[in-house]
Amino acid sequence: VQGDVHTSDILSQPDDPALPPPPPKDDGGEDILLVGVDARTDMQGNELSSSMLKTLRTEQTGGINTDTLIILRLPKNGGKPFAVSIPRDTWVTVPRGGQAKINSVFGTAKAAAAAQLRAQGERDAARIERDSDEVGRKALVQTIQDFTQVRIDHYAEVNLLGFYLITEALGGVQVCLNHATEDKDSGANFSAGVQTVTGGEALSFVRQRKNLPRGDLDRIVRQQAFLGSALHKVLTAGVLTNPGKLNDLTDALHRSLVLDPDFDLLQLAEKAKGLASGAVSFQTIPVLTINGRSPDGQSIVEVDPEAVRQFFTALATQPTGGGGSSGGGAAPAGVTCVN
């Protein structure tokens, strides 16, 4: 599983006095940043074909956004794990100055680095893609550490194609909806109740935010519920002991994930048993409003950075790792009913 996974030296930060110092390294837990990137490329940076984009229920766009950001904390004292989502439109201070939506930090830093490499005479497109991605990832980690005061110990990233491949390898993931819903932008068209989604359907499920009561906050709950259900399937449905299924999943992971070099997937699988059993607490950072406006007129999620830091501190110091999980309703084990 570990051998051919794509790695990137994301967590080594430059010794730059202009940047805020990182939070303390040993804070009593292992903190993993889970990132979903809306890149319309494969792992080599090649643009996806129009037929594949249609399968993914999306279209070609410029730039890259990190539309899913989750900090997963595994306490070292055996306490209850928790996962905290950061809304994609959260307005934050960028470590090198200025403010921006948190989902734009990766793409902005990547674009600047790519332009600089080209100006220096670099013509190898693959190298430009690879090196500029690394700059983008480091900028994202720096921003999140400064924003939350949580030291990121590991990093895992998946793009749209990777998400598609993983759900296909799993044979779909069970989800449960309280109400039927539809959204032409994401391609969502789901009935109420328990159902299995895979490939493009799964992407529509986690990307829908229109026609949901709380917009992006309900999309976050969708993502959390999907993650819990997917982990439950991997760890309880015989995937890890079925050679055929394991080979399919391993191949998908090789083609889909970007990790820091020290991220051990098998160790995570062992620790993730608590997630699959429903013991994890899924939460979202406290927000002031999801209907804010930036000085330049962008629609943003307004937050109080100090309240966010206090929120993480309170979670980290509780022996059980926080409160109850999001969502509700009757559903099979490992599946949470959501809007």
Image (cartoon, grey):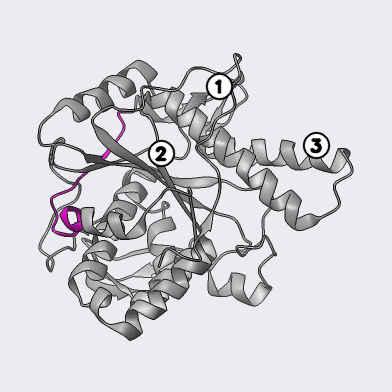
Distance CA(mark 3)–CA(mark 1)? 19 Å
Q: Residues within 10 Å of mark 3 (few under 14, many from 20)?
A: some
Does label 2 or label 1 sit earlier along the sequence?
2
The residue tagged with tag 2: helix, strand or loop? Answer: loop
Looking at numbered disc 2 in the image, what kind of residue is underneath it? Pro
Which residue is located at x 45 percent, y 67 percent?
Answer: 253
Q: Looking at the picture, how far across and down is residue 319, in whole percent?
A: 10, 32
Nearest the eye: 186 or 30: 30
Q: Is residue 273 above or below residue 260?
A: below
**Residue beneath label 3, please?**
116
Of residue 192 and residue 336, the one placed in the foreground of this image is 336
Question: Start and end of the magenta stretch?
Answer: 272-286
Q: Residue furthest bottom?
A: 244
| Camera-nearest label, 3 or 2 | 3
Q: CA distance from mark 2 to mark 1?
A: 19 Å
What is the crowding at mark 1: few (fewer than 14 residues within 10 Å), some, or many (at least 20)? Answer: some
Q: Amino acid at mark 3?
A: Gln
Examine the rendering and report whether any part of residue 171 can be seen.
no
User: What residue sits right under mark 2 in the picture?
Assistant: 87
Report x, y in % for residue 50: 67, 73
Give SS at disc 3. helix
Residue type at the position of mark 1: Pro
